[in-house]
Amino acid sequence: MSAKHDHEAEPVVHEYDGIQECDNSLPNWWLATFAATIIFGGLYWFHYEAFHFGESPNEVYQTELDQRAAAEAEKIKKAGAITPEALVSLSKDKGTVATGQDIFKKNCVQCHREDAGGNVGPNLTDNAWLHGGSPDAIFKTVSQGVPAKGMQPWQPQLGVERTMAVVAYVLTLKNTNVPGGKAPQGTVE
Ligand code: HEC
């Protein structure tokens, strides 16, 4: 193979030490691919970032988690078993937690405050518990109450499923430490 460049249409623009550099035009297939990546990048950006037509992988993942949690919650409600695992699963289901929050707003805020920071009743957003902060302990306190201290048993009034829902909501409050909450009472967990 000759080192000399002999193509007339692509003139040599630089030569050094017998090595020739030509000003060749880029192949069309290369230019087409390059243009395609720019167009793809632009469309991708408009689709996912600028106008949010498409869900990002994170959003798709979150939606899948939400759907799983909801399906799991359905199963738990059908099975009707009150276990710590069941209560924790319910606390991850948005629908159940929203129902629980609604129940809390209607029945619990006069003593535990709108944000659960505590009033007559203790702060439910700290890490200290008078009757235990595990899911089953909280379920027991809410369902059986502490009548001697003014907290009524809620299960007779709410039923099992709604008691579980409000407990699921209370579980989401643990350690959120709302500002201006009542000083911790009981044992730190
Ligand atoms: C009439 C006031 C009152 C209402 C209404 C009330 N509570 Fe209470 N709650 C209390 C009091 C007082 C205590 C503390 C009992 C004690 O000192 O042993 C308490 C304790 C608790 C505890 C245990 C906290 C701990 O530190 O162990 C939980 C959980 C709880 N309440 C949840 C609820 C939920 C959920 C509702 C609504 C369904 C509710 N409470 C409604 C007064 C109330």
Image: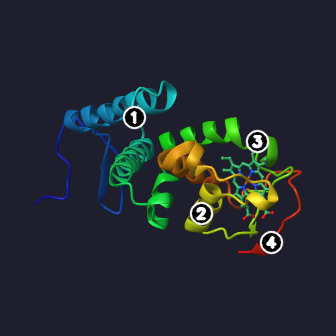
Determine the image quadrant of residue 31.
top left
N-term mark: 2 or 3: 3
Residue for badge 2: 140
Label count reads 4
Determine the image quadrant of residue 107.
top right
| In the image: residue 163, left or right of residue 151 | left
Residues at marks 4 and 3, CA–CA distance in whole angstroms: 20 Å
Label 3 beta carbon less than 8 Å to ligand 1: yes
Residue for badge 1: 41
Residue for badge 3: 109
Whether tag 1 and tag 3 are in contact, CB under 8 A, the answer is no
Observer-nearest of 161 and 11: 161
Residues at marks 1 and 4, CA–CA distance in whole angstroms: 57 Å
Label 4 beta carbon less than 8 Å to ligand 1: yes
Kind of residue at badge 2: Lys
Q: Residue at x 25, y 39 (%)?
A: 30
Q: Residue at x 61, y 68 (%)?
A: 137
Mark sitting on residue 186: 4
